[in-house]
Amino acid sequence: MYIGPTTRRRRRWPWLLLFILVAAAAVWYLRTQGLELGFLSLRGRQPLTPTPTQISSKERVARADRLFEQGKINDAMNEYRRAIELDPSDATPHARLGRLLTLRGRLAEGLRTAQRAVEIDSESAENQAILGMALDWYGDYDAAIEACLKAIDLDPTYATAHAYLAEAYADKGRLERALQTADKAISLDAGNYYAHRNLGYVMEKFGDYDAAIAAYTEAIALQPNLAYLYVSLGRAYQALGDPDGAIEQFLKGTEVDPDDPTTYDSVGLAYYGQQDFELAIAQFRKATEVDPEFANAYGHLGWCYYVQRRYEDAIPQFEKAISLGASAVEFYYELGLSYVYIGDCEQGRPWLEEALAIDPYAEPALQGLQSCQGQ
């Protein structure tokens, strides 16, 4: 086989090495100038990430509504608050937040929030009805009736407005009208748990506790996730002279919603009624731990200390309750009397006078002022 002369190949590695060195130098130069090869992004600029989708106010409200139906009241309130932040002009989250604050026992805040909803939109039947409920729980029964009637004028078929009106009539002492209104609410919507709950409340006011228990039980069957329904049922058992049955229902309320201070407060009141003050104090303290702004629990703590003649312990509890918006006349005159009993009429007299401004016939306040005469 013929093999011709071979040609000598040129060595390429020096050129390859030179190319690598030049490329490395270019990379170094570009990086010192704040550039990244491939991305060509300025130094310090973060890689692009997807922008999260903003949840709208109405989507927040819908989420809050679902949480409420599940009994997750704190989570629902937080969602309503976020909805308000996103759109302060939307009345719906104001109204529904006001209702939940009221159910939580934060009556003054609940009323303010419900009033804001009506300021934004006074032509909403829901807003007017919730305002009526908040006013009723706050103790302004005439204004509550007026607001509920406005709601019914706006929407005569709105069962919840009739239910809230029935409760306000019952608190006003107009029991026959209350019963008619509660029946009307159920006739409009037999599946409305507010209607059944407030029928139970009306029957409780009539003193028909068996009928009240039946109505409350039906409300719970329709909505088993709301603690205040168990509180209502427990109160009816308590009125029947069954404290154990009452406590059982109140404790069910704590299981359904461990963050609801009204359930612990109700257990405490049951123990207070049995004169088991230490157990009562423990429950009232639990209520204040769950919600430090729940005014009534501080006042009820004051009651426990007051009946034990621990007046110096009672005074800060009553003052805290009143500062948080509690309006019970007993808190005012027992605060005043606590000062009187430790020999400080100067501090006690203004509270006794405020008690009389709330109820001119509050006999303990009158007696306290008489005992301070000349001092």
Image: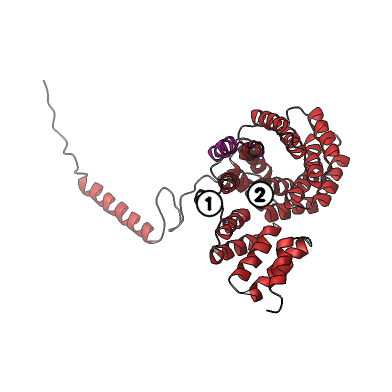
Q: Where is residue 198 in the image (x, y as percent from the top left)?
A: 74, 37
Relative placement, left or right, of 3 versus 357 is: left
Q: Magenta stretch containing residue 245, yes or no? A: yes
- Residue 374 location in percent, x, y? 71, 79
Relative to residue 314, is residue 236 depicted above or below?
A: above
Q: Residue 330 lies in what quarter of the image?
A: bottom right
Q: In terms of depth relative to the viewer, which is nearer, 154 or 287? A: 287
Give the Cα separation between the discs numbered 1 and 2: 28 Å
Q: Name the residue under label 1.
A: 277
Secondary structure category for the residue under label 1? helix
SS class, disc 2: helix
In the figure, residue 158 lies in which quadrant? Answer: top right
Circle 1 Cα neighbour tier, 10 Å, few/some/many (<14 / 14–19 / ≥20)? many
Give the foreground label among 1 and 2: 1
- Of residue 107 and residue 6, the one placed in the foreground of this image is 107
Please name the amino acid that badge 1 sits on.
Phe
- Name the residue type under label 2: Leu
Locate residue 325: give its quadrant: bottom right
x then y, percent, for residue 285 = 52, 53
Which residue is found at the position 69% from the left and 68% from the top?
368
For the view shown, which residue lies furthest in the right direction?
A: 153
For residue 155, say whether it is visible.
no
Q: Which residue lies furthest to the bottom in this view?
A: 374
| Residue span colored magenta | 239-255
Nearer-the-camera pick, 160 or 203: 203
Left or right of 168 in this view: 241: left
Is 176 inside the magenta-drawn segment? Answer: no
Q: Quadrant of the C terminus?
A: bottom right
User: Disc 2 designates what residue?
Assistant: 101
The residue shown at (69%, 71%) is 371
Give above or below for 232 relative to 131.
above
